[in-house]
Amino acid sequence: MSEASTVTAAPTGVFTTTRARISARTLRTDRWWLPPLITVLGLGAFVVYATVRSFVRTAYYVADYHYLTPFYSPCLSTSCVEGASHFGTPLGDLPMWIPLGFAVLPFLLGFRLTCYYYRKAYYRAVWFSPPACAVAEPHAKYTGETRLPLIIQNAHRYFFYVALLVSLVNSYDAVVAFHGKSGGFGFGLGNLVLLLNVVLLWAYTLSCHSCRHIAGGRLKNFSAHPVRYWFWTQVSKLNTRHMALAWTTLGTLVLTDFYVMLVASGTISDLRFID
């Protein structure tokens, strides 16, 4: 065996020879593990719920009021129930292993996975990189976001563009839902749920760091671009709440889908204000 093949890579990160030699994983005495635990439980619960609901193909559309859950929008297949395809059915029947909302779900997943806040959340909670401040990560090497799969994080801006289109689709769904059981205009509790979800989804999408860079990036003189400066200022205000919106929109997505499911399945009746 050659001498070169026996040489091991030098440790990186907290294991380098220049770092202090502390055998304990951390000297912290507080419950530093609690935030990562809550994060992984919250994200895991959403992933399980969203995955199940995306594949069951039941109780996702209320024909009487045109309520459509965001997990199935847009529904572009002839497999969709009648009326759920707000943009037509250019696709034929889909096998059961393909979710009816497949046209946008991968892009929305990509947008969330590459989001700057979610990166911090699951890097710490799932990969322990690092699990908390002043807590050594278990990995001996660190390559950053330069290799697969993490190099895909650099495509966040492109996922953002698709997320904008999806927000427009969801907005259209919310407008179409102002429909009465006997036809014409109608307004019920479901409309409030759909509207709340759409507004918060827009807030989360526009508070994205990529949106902030698109609004004001590469400008050398803000005074020469007053419109972009104003937009950048508004996006920057939203950006300070990006973490809260990231979690809130997970909740409103589940709430919206769950409410539509209850009404569509006949478990509850929609509270109508105008019908």
Image (spheres, helix red, strand yellow):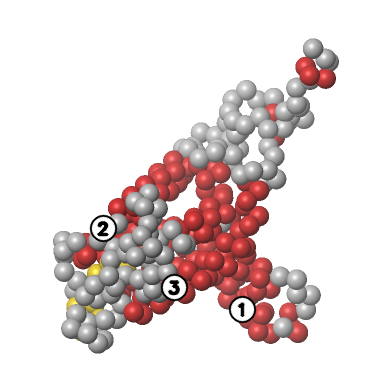
Nearer to me, 226 or 145:
145
Q: Which structural element holds mark 1?
A: helix
Q: Which mark is residue 87?
A: none
Name the residue that disc number 3 marks: 169
Tell me residue 76's x, y (percent): 40, 67
The residue tagged with tag 3: helix, strand or loop? helix
Q: Is residue 229 visible?
A: yes
Q: Amino acid at mark 3?
A: Val
- Residue position marked by numbered label 1 in the rendering: 231
Asked if residue 34 is positioned above or below residue 240 in the image, the reply reads: above
Earlier-in-chain disc, 2 versus 3: 2
Tell me which numbered mark, 3 or 1, is placed earlier along the sequence.
Answer: 3
Dividing the picture into quadrants, the one containing residue 28 is top right
**In the depicted structure, whether residue 147 falls above or below residue 187:** above
Marks 3 and 1 close (CB-CB < 8 Å): no
- Circle nearer the viewer, 2 or 3: 2
Q: Residue at x 63, y 69 (%)?
A: 212
Of mark 2 and mark 1, the one earlier in the sequence is 2
Query: Disc 2 to disc 3, how far (Cα)?
Result: 21 Å
Q: Position of residue 254 (x, y in %)?
A: 34, 58
- Closest to the camera, between mark 2 and mark 1, is 2
Residue type at mark 2 is Thr
- Relative to residue 111, is residue 169 drawn left or right? left
Q: Nearer the viewer, residue 120 or 60?
A: 60
Residue 176 coordinates in the image, percent (x, y):
34, 79
Q: Residue at x 51, y 33 (%)?
A: 29
Whole-angstrom CA distance, mark 3 to mark 1, is 22 Å
Query: Where does label 2 land, which residue?
Result: 58
